[in-house]
Image (cartoon, coloured by chain):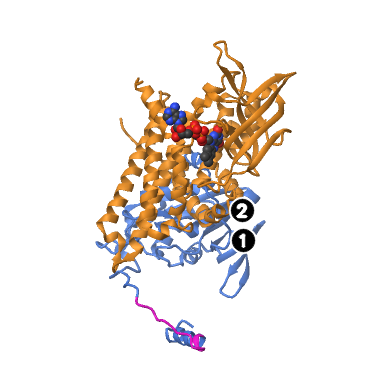
Chain colours: A orange, B blue
Amino acid sequence: MLDYRLDDETETLRKVVREFALEVVAPQIGDFYERDEFPTDIVRQMGELGLFGLPFPEEYGGSGGDYFTLCVALEELARVDSSVAITLEAGVSLGAMPIYRFGTEEQKQQWLPRLCAGEALGAFGLTEPGGGSDAGATKTTAKLEDGHWVLNGSKAFITNSGTDLTELVIATAVTGTRPDGGKEISAILVPSGTPGLAVGKRYSKVGWNASDTRELSFTDVRVPEENLVGGRGRGYAQFLQILDEGRIAISALAVGLAQGCVDESVKYAAQREAFGRAIGKNQAVQFMIADMEVRASTARLAYYRAAEKMLRGEPFKREASIAKLYSSEMAMENARYATQVHGGYGFMNEFPVGRFYRDAKILEIGEGTSEVQRMLIARDLGVG
Amino acid sequence: MNIVVLVKQVPDSGSERKLDSSDNTVARASADNVINEMDEYAIEEALTVKESQGGEVTVLTVGPGSATDAIRKALSMGADKAVHVTDDAVHGSCAVQTSAVIAAALQQLEYDLVLCGAESTDGQVSVMPALLSERLGIPHLSGARKLTVEGTTVRVERQTDGGYWMLESSLPAIVSTWDTINEPRYPSFKGIMAAKKKPVETKSLADLGVDPASVGLATATSRVLDFAGRPPKGEGVKVADEGDGAEKLVGYLAAQKLV
Ligand SMILES: Cc1cc2nc3c(=O)[nH]c(=O)nc-3n(C[C@H](O)[C@H](O)[C@H](O)COP(=O)(O)OP(=O)(O)OC[C@H]3O[C@@H](n4cnc5c(N)ncnc54)[C@H](O)[C@@H]3O)c2cc1C
């Protein structure tokens, strides 16, 4: 059976998020972006809509949906703006998901209700200044001393790590040596405000300017032993699982951006005149837009397919990598063509496509670069 | 407190709307149909009253089968149940005929307060609350920008061009609301999931005891005889300000009978 129609509830959610993005996000996000400011109030409203609780059960304050409904919401948000979309994506799939998947019952009870309501945000610190793709190269350490983990090291490019809503970061750290001599990597929950945790200034970024990204440093940060998230030495394996899902979410975000490029280009091609007629009357412009639509629709199928396998409980690693790789590269391409359709105005920040252009590139880098995705796909095919 | 909200599904006013050339009625099948925007304010107000006073909110709609989308949205926002009157014979009905159907449906419900939007964006006839008030013999307070209920009394501020009137009546009553009255909530996903389990009762004209011959295009009190597309926008008039710009503008507006 093949059926990629959304059921009534998911379709209603899609429409509601679309409405919210157009009515609440679109009118003000350009200013936040320009000022490099985190839109706290918009994020709170997203919380009231239940978006941060989408894939979690109601017993922890979640909305009782699934990971696919989250993806649909991400797509509709990113169709208007990627900064708010990545804030949601990171908040859910990096901040809250590790606690839900691997946390103890106490950790879930303590943190999930506020995270699901969007009243609090969690960050996930994996990448370090010395490297991201090679996650096994973690240098941050956590030593167990009289019932406390003592963390030292630093993390780079951490989303949602210094907002007014941020209440915790889950950091991966080396907690010892494995029997085979390799590093034992674990994940440890550090509440915001713990002495020794220094939250750096916001990076000055090329895109995602209304999203919060910072460097974190840990100097003798002490947290209780119970703050271990998941099994000791399971940090690496756990985050790989989290990242597999996250790739589907990033793919949805990329599809949203790509569809936003189509929306804006269709509008602009009908309005803008050159040589006495709408630019959309030129086949060259029509073809650019038709190709954009082709890319956006095929990429959507790719993430639907990956999500479908995941929800059915089948292996979905390859499909997630395919979706992430294809949709991020085609989002980049759509952003380039949408800017082209807009001419000089496409290079201006006041037009959404200017933002789309700046926001697209990171999609080929975050949560596994394009090269890493190709490596994974090839490995899964048994090549190399 | 039993509150009934009248909800209509209309073609999205933001997209291109058409009339059906076969019988000059609104082309609903091909349109992007949404809940009438003004009705969302009525739903929000009903939910606000319910949250402060307790009670139940019922959504009542007359429309084709596809109007379930509008019902679902109202239920997702938090209404408790819905009545959907749907019958092919209703197609093409005028406001007077429709009011007879709605009144018959209301008579089968218990209500203290009936809320509706001040107008619908398709017909823009804006007479439904008055027609219902007449048929049901209950007071009608139109164009509310503020509403309070105390015991069996409802008070509204009725918005006017220059200010507002303060109106008060006993319940049951029908109140129509403007978009200045509140900010409608977005349905949460929990609300959307919960809506799935809420009761929606479908009724035909026979269920309401309404004679099918008394409604519909054939006996409507008004019908569209002919229609044409909106003429293309004209060139417009440029007023050069040579110290007398304001006078020229006022002169232009006066000539158009706009002031
Ligand atoms: C805005 C933003 C937000 C982020 N948010 C987070 C977050 O919340 N949490 C977090 O942990 N991280 C976060 N990151 C980090 C992100 O995941 C990393 O930047 C990414 O994984 C790449 O790592 P890197 O920057 O160290 O690049 P590197 O690993 O140094 O890679 C540099 C280049 O070398 C290539 N390369 C590396 N190894 C190979 C190989 N074996 N074969 C072929 N090519 C190779 C890469 O593909 C890339 O092109 C964020 C980054 C940004 C920019």
**Percent of width and height locating residue A75:** 44, 43
**Percent of width and height locating residue B40:** 51, 55
Residue beneath label 2, please? B49
Q: Which residues are magenta?
A: B234-245
Asked whether the beta carbons under mark 1 and mark 2 sit within 8 Å of each other, the answer is yes
**Position of residue B130 in the picture relative to residue A152 (left or right):** left
Q: Chain of mark 2?
A: B
- Name the residue at 39% across, 46% down: A258
**Position of residue B51 in the picture relative to residue A245 (left or right):** right
Crowding at mark 2 (Cα within 10 Å: few <14, some 14-19, many 20+): some
In the drawing, what numbered circle is on residue B147? Answer: 1
**Position of residue A278 in the picture relative to residue B133 (left or right):** left
> Dominant secondary structure of the magenta stretch?
loop
Amino acid found under the numbered disc labelled 1: Leu
- The residue most toward the front is A130
Q: Identify the image quadrant of residue B151.
A: bottom right
